[in-house]
């Protein structure tokens, strides 16, 4: 593992497989990539070290993403507000964006990204709590975002609830990829 003597135990890999939509190989690759984001002196204790947000933003998958800062914010469990990520945060992020994750899981995370600061995750430290509906205001949004939000509000009550959001996402399967 790039000079690192740290390895994931079989028991931990099995736990991560049960708690995510990731395969054993994907978990091991995530472990390697997470370790590569750490300074060399921290690679022996990967599970105990948080990676700063600016290091995550160097990943090719996030680098060009216009929502990269929100993605880091949603998946970070940092108590310091710095959006740093633990290895488990990183697994949550990869799992939610995995092709194996259900549409419901993806839509909940996407919805949470925009609306619910006290989010919870897939790992044993929390479970989903979805807000009943999220108010929105087209003011200040770009024209495309404004039209999308207005069209998503099927009952025209000024909010987008979970079922409205899932309806929009189900009509646009590429949206969650």
Image (cartoon, rainbow, N blue to C red):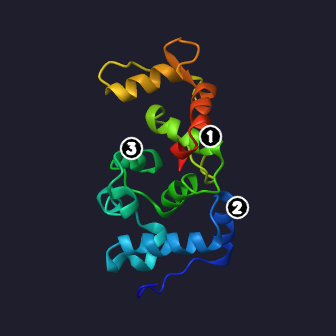
Q: Above or below — where is 102 with respect to 95?
A: above
Return the residue nearer the eye: 135 or 150: 150
Which quarter of the picture shows residue 146?
Answer: top left
Residue annotated with mark 2: 18
Q: Above or below — where is 22 with respect to 167?
A: below
Which quarter of the picture shows residue 39?
Answer: bottom left
Return the residue nearer the eye: 16 or 98: 98
Residue 43: horizontal and vertical position, in percent?
Answer: 40, 78
User: Residue at the top extreme?
Assistant: 157
Residue 23 shown left or right of residue 75 in the figure: right
Dot 1 crowding, Cα within 10 Å, few <14, some 14–19, many 20+:
few
Q: Residue at x 62, y 78 (%)?
A: 9
On residue 96, which mark appears? none
Report how far apart the C-alphas of labels 2 and 1 lie in the structure: 16 Å
Residue 118: horizontal and vertical position, in percent?
Answer: 49, 36
The secondary structure type at the circle numbered 3 is helix
Report how far apart the C-alphas of labels 1 and 3 lie in the structure: 18 Å
Q: Earlier in the sequence, mark 2 or mark 1?
A: 2
Return the residue nearer the eye: 35 or 114: 114
Dot 2 crowding, Cα within 10 Å, few <14, some 14–19, many 20+:
few
The secondary structure type at the circle numbered 2 is helix
On residue 128, which mark appears? 1
Front disc: 1 or 3: 3
Q: Residue at x 51, y 18 (%)?
A: 159
Residue annotated with mark 3: 70
Report how far apart the C-alphas of labels 3 and 2 lie in the structure: 26 Å
Is disc 3 in contact with disc 2, using a CB cutoff of under 8 Å?
A: no
Is disc 1 in contact with disc 3, using a CB cutoff of under 8 Å?
A: no
Residue 165: horizontal and vertical position, in percent?
Answer: 57, 30
Q: Earlier in the sequence, mark 1 or mark 3?
A: 3
Q: Earlier in the sequence, mark 3 or mark 2?
A: 2
């Amino acid at each position: 593992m790039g000079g690192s003597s740290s390895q994931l135990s079989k028991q931990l890999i099995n736990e991560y497989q049960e708690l995510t939509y990731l395969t054993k190989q994907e978990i091991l690759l995530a472990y390697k990539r997470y370790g590569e984001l750490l300074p060399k002196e921290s690679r022996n204790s990967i599970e105990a070290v948080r990676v700063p947000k600016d290091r995550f933003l160097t990943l090719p998958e996030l680098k060009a993403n216009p929502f990269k800062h929100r993605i880091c914010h949603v998946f970070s469990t940092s108590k310091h507000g710095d959006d740093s990520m633990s290895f488990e945060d990183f697994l949550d992020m990869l799992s939610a964006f995995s092709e194996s994750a259900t549409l419901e899981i993806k839509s909940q995370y996407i919805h949470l990204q925009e609306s619910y600061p006290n989010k919870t995750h897939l790992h044993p430290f929390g479970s989903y709590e979805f807000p009943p509906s999220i108010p929105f205001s087209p003011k200040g949004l770009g024209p495309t975002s404004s039209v999308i939000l207005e069209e998503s509000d099927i009952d025209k009550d000024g909010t987008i609830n979970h079922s409205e959001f899932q309806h929009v996402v189900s009509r646009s399967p590429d949206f969650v990829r």
